[in-house]
Amino acid sequence: MQKAKRRLTTTNIWLLIAVAFFAIMPIWAPVMWKHLITEIFIIALFAMSLNMILGRGGLPSFGHACFYCIGGYTTAMFMMKLHLPFGIAMIAAPVVAAIFSAVIGYFSVRLTGIHFAILTLGFGQLVWAIIHKWYSFTKGDDGITGIPVPAALQGITAYYYLVFAILIICLILIWMVQNSPFGTTLVAIRENRDRVTFSGLKVWHHLWLNFIIAGFFAGIAGSLLVILQRAVFPEFGYWTISAGVLLMCILGGVGVFIGPIVGAAIITLLEHYISVYTFYWQMVLGCLIIILVIFMPGGICGFIQDRIKGRKA
Amino acid sequence: MVLKVSGLTKSFGALMAVDNVNLEVDEEEQVAIIGPNGAGKTTFFNLLTGYFPADSGKVLFKGEDISKLSSDQIIRRGMGRSFQIVNIYPDISVFESIQMTLLAGKRRTYNIFSPAKNIYREDTERILEAVGLTELADVPGGSLSHGDKKRLEMGMVLAIKPKLILLDEPTAGMAPEETVATMALVKELAEKEHLSMIFTEHDMSVIFEWAKRIAVMYQGRIIADGTPEEIRENPEVRRVYLGEKK
C-alpha cells in the first residue's frame, strides 16, 4: 500500500510536469511546432479512443477511422451546409459519430478476433465509399474545404489551447471510465468471457456501450482535426488511417494508459521529420515495428513499465 | 423444489449426449452425478445453464421454465456454476475477481463514472474469508495453485448469491488432502448459505464419502438415482460403471 502510494505520487509529479510543459510551450515555440503538437494532441485522442476497444475490450478494430471521419464531416457539414455556429457543429460531431458507432457496433461486437477485425474494416470501407461517391452530398474526393473558423480560434496559439484543454478533459473522462465498474467489467470480459457470462452479465451489451463511447471520442478528435486543417477529405476514413492508429496503440503499448499517446507522438513525429530526408519514411517505421514486435511486445510504455516494476520488486 | 428437469435431450450428430434426463432437486439438497468420461455430465450442466440449447425437454428452476433463456439470464435467476477446467480471470487479482462478480450480481456494471476500487470492499472480504483466500487477495488469479484457483472460482460462484450451484468436478486435479479440504469447504458453504447443489465427480471415494444422494449417468441417460448404499447395490450400476473399475 505504501509503495503503491509513493509510485502514484511520482506518476502524478511527472504528469504535472508534462501538463505544465505543454501549457507554457506556446509562449516560446515556433508556429510550426505549435501546429505539429496540436496535431499530435488530436491524433493522440483518436488513438486513446481506439485503445478503449483494443486495449480494454481486447478487440482489434480496423475501421475506427470511420468515426474520426464522420466526426470531421459532421462539423464541416453543419457549418458549411447548415450554416450552424461552430460550437454546435463541434458538439454534434461526437454525437453523430456515436450514433454511427452504435449501429456498426451492434453488429460487430458480437464477433471476436479476426472476424471482428474484418467486419469493422468492412463497415469502415463502406462509410468511406459512401462519402467518396456521394458527390452531391459530400463533394466526394474534392472534400470540403474553406471551413470558416471563428476569429478567436484563427491563431494557432488559441487553437492549441482549446485542443489541449479538450484533450485533458477527454483523458480524465476516459480514465474515469476505465477505472469504473464498467471499465473493470471490460477487463474481465477480455480475460474470460465465459466467466463474465456466468456472473450473469450480457457480455455484448458492455462491449457495445464501450464501442459507442470510443466512437464518441473519435468523433471529437475528427472534429478537432477538421478545424485545424480547415478541410476534410474522405481519406480521413480510409482503412490505412485505421491501421495507422492501431499501430500507434501497439507501438506505445495497449496495456498502459498513456501508451497510445506516446505511440501517436512517435509516429506523427517520425512521419514529419523523416519524410524531410527520405520519401521512404515508412521503411524506417517498418524497421521500428519489427524491432518492437520482437523485443517489446508490450509496446514502448509496457516495456518501460516492466523495467520500473522489475527494479522495484 | 428448486430444480425439476424433465425429458432433457441433446444430440450432437449421431451421438446422444444427453438422453431423456429427468432429475429433481429439493431445497438445500446435495446431489452428486457420477459417470464415466463422456457420459454427458458436462453437457447436462451446459444445458441447464443455457450454454447451448436442448433439443427437447424442460427445465423448471424455482418453478420457472428456463429452458429457453440465455446463460446470463439463468445465472441472474440464481444458478451458479463452476467449470471442470478452472475458469477464472488470470491477470486480475483475487480481490478484484470477487469484487467484479459482486458488481455483476448487483447490476452495477453499467456505472461508468464512479471509481470501482472502493465498491463492495466488505462483501468481498467476507467472501474471501469464506473460501480461505484472504491472505492471497492481491495475487493475480493465474498465479494461484490449482486448489486455490478452484477456491477462487467457488468464491465467484458464491458472489452472485445463488440458490443452486452446479459444480463440475470441483476436486479435479487435486491432491488427496486438497480434495478433502475442498469438499469440506463446499459442504460447509452450501449448508451455511442454504444452497442446493449438484456436483459431478469421477473419484469414487469422494462420492461415497460426501454425497447423500447419487445419480449415475451412462451414455447420456440417468440409469440410477438413490442413496450411496442403493447405488452400490444396484446391479446395472455395478455392471456399467463400478464393474469397469475392478
Image: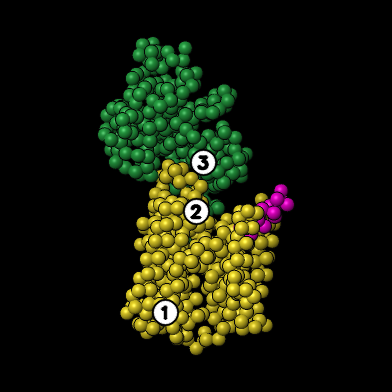
Colour of chain B as rendered: green
The chain identifier of the residue carrying mark 2 reads A
Mark number for residue B20? none
The kind of residue tagged 2 is Gly
Q: Chain of mark 1?
A: A
Q: Residue at x 41, y 79 (%)?
A: A143
User: Where does the image place residue B7, in percent across and percent down from the top left?
Assistant: 27, 29
In reply to whether residue A83 is colored magenta, the answer given is no
Circle 1 is placed at which residue position? A143
Q: Which residue type does callout 1 highlight?
A: Gly
Residue identifier under label 3: B88
To which residue does mark 2 refer? A58
The subunit carrying tag 3 is B
**From the viewer's perspective, is the residue at label 3 or at label 1 nearer?**
1
Q: Which residues are magenta?
A: A299-313
SS assignment at label 1: loop
Q: Main secondary structure of the magenta part?
A: helix
Q: Gap in Å between the C-alphas at discs 3 and 2?
A: 17 Å
**Mark 2–mark 1 CB contact (< 8 Å):** no
Q: Is residue A17 visible?
A: yes
User: To which quarter of the image does residue B147 belong?
Assistant: top right
Mark nearer the viewer, 2 or 1: 1
Residue B232, compared with residue B114, is above or below; it is above
Nearest-to-viewer mark from 3 and 2: 2
Residue B114, how many percent across, how many down? 50, 58
- At a point 73% along the width and 52% down the height, the residue shown is A311
